[in-house]
Image (cartoon, rainbow, N blue to C red):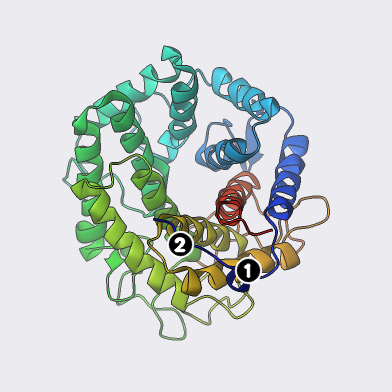
Amino acid sequence: MAAVITMGAMGQIVADDVLAVTRKANDYFMKKYADPTIPTNVKKVRPSSLWTRAVYYEGLMALYEIDPQQRYMDYTDTWANFHQWTPRNGVKTCDADDQCCEQTYLIRYVQTKEEKMLAPTLQNLDLQMGAENKKVGSPYGWWTWIDAIQMAMPVYMQAYQITGEKKYCDHAMKMYRWSRNECGGGLFNVKDGLWWRDADYVPPYKEPDGKDCYWSRGNGWVYAALVRCMNQLQKKSKEYKELKKDFLMMSEGLRKCQREDGFWNPSLVSTNYEMPETSGTALFLYGMAWGIQKGYLKADIYAPVCEKAWTAMVRDAVHADGFLGWMQGTGKDPSAGQPLSYTKIPDFEDYGTGCFLLGATEYFKLLQKNNVK
């Protein structure tokens, strides 16, 4: 049962205002990248089915749920048809970054039941389930970096939901547990409720101030993945309960390290690169707004966290034309793309916009569900 949120908890933020800002950010992106088939060209040419663009479409699909404009679907289908509803680098890929686009393909399959949107993904997952990662000596050791959990784990859970074949769920959980408990000695620190990005960042690695290096967006990837996977599972299933437990630990760990201004630092608990960062902040808003709606997070504790995060992004990151500032570029730790600023354009704008759309749309649903006017 969802918690009831009062005006006192949510301040004066209006759902329609959230939607207006969300549309503005998306319109900026769709106008700037009007042809979704054109490859990206940052240092080298990459097809527009790469993970950065795929995350954008996750956000666009979320926006469509609350703002069902046909142009969003047209834009998506133009992109997906161009790539033949196939993961980047083909169906034989085992790279989670290549598989991220499949999340949108499967969302569109559920909406249309067109077989072309489903078949390549199932072929890809079936091939991966029979392949061993020889570098780590495990058939489950493909997700050696936590970003991969967001890129690929929801695809497996979507495939399970669509087909009813438990093998997809089982394999995803085994890969998740390998990353959580075995990779680098275990990438999830249950004491702090936060994740190290990969084996290179587990202790004894430290930030210059002696603190652990918990990368903001990396933790955002996992947090979002937990939500997206639970959305595909039965609440009473053991898998749902297992992911929910980690979600609750993460929620508490993240709440404790929110900045006073409402953002989170690129390095969550460290003073190294102490500054606002939008992509992680948006993903944390996504998870917390979802958790409040489900009744898993106490509204009197987490609604103010969400309000601060949204207010901070609108005040300090969203430009008048919809451009998003304080967005960290691609990389794998807090040092990537530094220094950040309000006006700096990151190397890729697509995934950051996708993160923002996810957070904004879930916050809109929270406000709307609780009749905050």
Q: Residue 255 vs residue 328: left or right?
A: left
Q: Residue at x 60, y 27 (%)?
A: 76
Query: On residue 332, which mark appears?
Result: none
Q: Position of residue 84 (x, y in %)?
A: 50, 17
Residue linked to disc 1? 7
Q: Residue 192 vs residue 169: left or right?
A: right
Disc 2 marks which amino acid? Ala
Residue linked to disc 2? 3
Q: Residue at x 69, y 54 (%)?
A: 18
- As helix, strand or loop, the secondary structure at mark 1 comes to helix
- As helix, strand or loop, the secondary structure at mark 2 comes to loop
Residue, far right: 320
Image quarter of residue 165: top left
Q: Residue at x 34, y 70 (%)?
A: 193
Does residue 371 appear in the picture of this structure? Answer: yes
State how far apart marks 1 and 2 are (Cα).
13 Å
Disc 1 marks which amino acid? Met
Q: Position of residue 107 (x, y in %)?
A: 47, 29
Viewer-proximal residue, 239 or 318? 239
